Structure formats: structure tokens, C-alpha cells
């Protein structure tokens, strides 16, 4: 399944929620940048982008079912939705299992187990830090605890320079 096919399918299933669409488009763009900078092979780049596109697949369901998009509920609800999303496509069982594993813990950075997982955590954080107005201290701590790629770290440093400086001088 080509990346643009995954993106179009995800847009189609987003019920016109532009905030959701803009979020995963941004995360996908950042993930692509980091994956390219890391010099990853084509299969791993594809996984990074596919995971970025579908990482919040459970948000609409969580809003309906729980009234919010609680991170733990997103992780819990993802597997069934991902299996349905990729059913009947040419995505291999191995790739689907990897996508499910990463998405089912994408709000659990202490469980990172591979470069694709690392890149999703970093790309998602780059977007969430702005969209959720994370405080300076939180950005500083997350950077120093969980960011590992040179490109992702550089992006965070450039995008959140003021907040990082604020945290370092506090």
C-alpha cells in the first residue's frame, strides 16, 4: 500500500475533522524528515510514514466512546481499528504487526523499541508540544529524556528555542 493511499484512506475516515487531519499530516512530514536524515532503508521509511499517518486512528472512536482522547484509551483501542484499516490491502502481516505494536504504545516513550518507534515519538511530540502548549520545563525534560535522533533533536531545539532557554535559566 502506497503512502499516499494510506493518507487518503485516513483522510476519508477522519469524518472531515481538520484538526485530526492536520495533526497527522504534520507528524508524517516530521517523521519523513527525521527518517530521511537517519538514512533509513526504504522499508523502514515506509513504516515510519505509515505509523505516523495512522498513529491517532483511535481518536474519533475514543471521543465517541469515552468523551475524550485519553492516551491510554487510544493505545487500547488501536489494534482492532488498525486491523480493519489494513484488511484487504497488500500490507504484510509482519508490517501490520509492527504498526500495531508501535501505535499501541505511541504515548509510552519508555517502551521505545526501534528506530521507527523512536521517530514516531519524536515527530508526534514536536507537533503536540505546540498544539497542547506544553510548558518549558516539560519540553526540556522530554528532550533530554526521550529524544535520540540528531534531526529530531535539532528540530526541537530550533522550534522550541525560547522555551528551552526559559527552562534552562529557570
Image (tube, grey):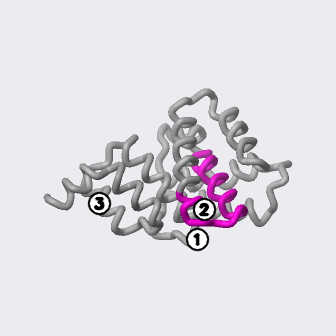
Label 2: few (<14), some (14–19) or many (≥20) C-alpha neighbours in 10 Å: many
Give the residue at mark 1: 114
- In the image, 102 versus 154, the foreground residue is 154
Q: In the rendered view, tell whether residue 99 sits above or below residue 145.
A: above
| Residue on which the image places disc 2 | 102
Q: Residues within 10 Å of mark 3 (few under 14, many from 20)?
A: many
Label 2: which secondary element? helix
- Magenta span of residues: 34-57
**Which residue is at 49% across, 44% downward?**
69
* Comes first in the chain, label 1 or label 2: 2
Residue 140: image tag? 3
Task: State the image coordinates of residue 89 (x, y, percent, origin top left).
Answer: 83, 49
Q: Secondary structure at mark 3?
A: helix
As for residue 50 lying within the magenta part, the answer is yes
Residue 21 located within the stretch drawn in magenta:
no
Kindly check if marks 1 and 2 are in contact, taking CB atoms under 8 A apart as contact. Answer: yes
Give the Cα distance between marks 1 and 2. Answer: 9 Å
Q: Quadrant of the C terminus?
A: bottom left
| Disc 3 versus disc 2: nearer the observer | 3
Quadrant of res 103: bottom right
**Left or right of residue 153: residue 1:** right
Residue at screen point 41% across, 67% down: 146
Q: Residue furthest left?
A: 170
Please give the name of the residue rendered at 80% of the width and 56% of the height, measured from the top-left corner.
Answer: 91
Amino acid at each position: 500500500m502506497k503512502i499516499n493511499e494510506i493518507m487518503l484512506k485516513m483522510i476519508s475516515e477522519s469524518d472531515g475533522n481538520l484538526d485530526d487531519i492536520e495533526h497527522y499530516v504534520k507528524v508524517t512530514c516530521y517523521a519523513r524528515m527525521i527518517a530521511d536524515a537517519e538514512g533509513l532503508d526504504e522499508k523502514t521509511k515506509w513504516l515510519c510514514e505509515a505509523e505516523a499517518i495512522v498513529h491517532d486512528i483511535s481518536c474519533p472512536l475514543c471521543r465517541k466512546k469515552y468523551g475524550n482522547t485519553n492516551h491510554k484509551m487510544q493505545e487500547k483501542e488501536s489494534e482492532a481499528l488498525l486491523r480493519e484499516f489494513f484488511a484487504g490491502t497488500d500490507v504484510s502481516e509482519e508490517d501490520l504487526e509492527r504498526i500495531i505494536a508501535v501505535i499501541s504504545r505511541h504515548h509510552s516513550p519508555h517502551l521505545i523499541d526501534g528506530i521507527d518507534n523512536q521517530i514516531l515519538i519524536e515527530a508526534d511530540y514536536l507537533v503536540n508540544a505546540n498544539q497542547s502548549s506544553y510548558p518549558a520545563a516539560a519540553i526540556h525534560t522530554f528532550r533530554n529524556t526521550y529524544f535520540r535522533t540528531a534531526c529530531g533533536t535539532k528540530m526541537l531545539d530550533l522550534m522550541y528555542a525560547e522555551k528551552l532557554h526559559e527552562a534552562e535559566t529557570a
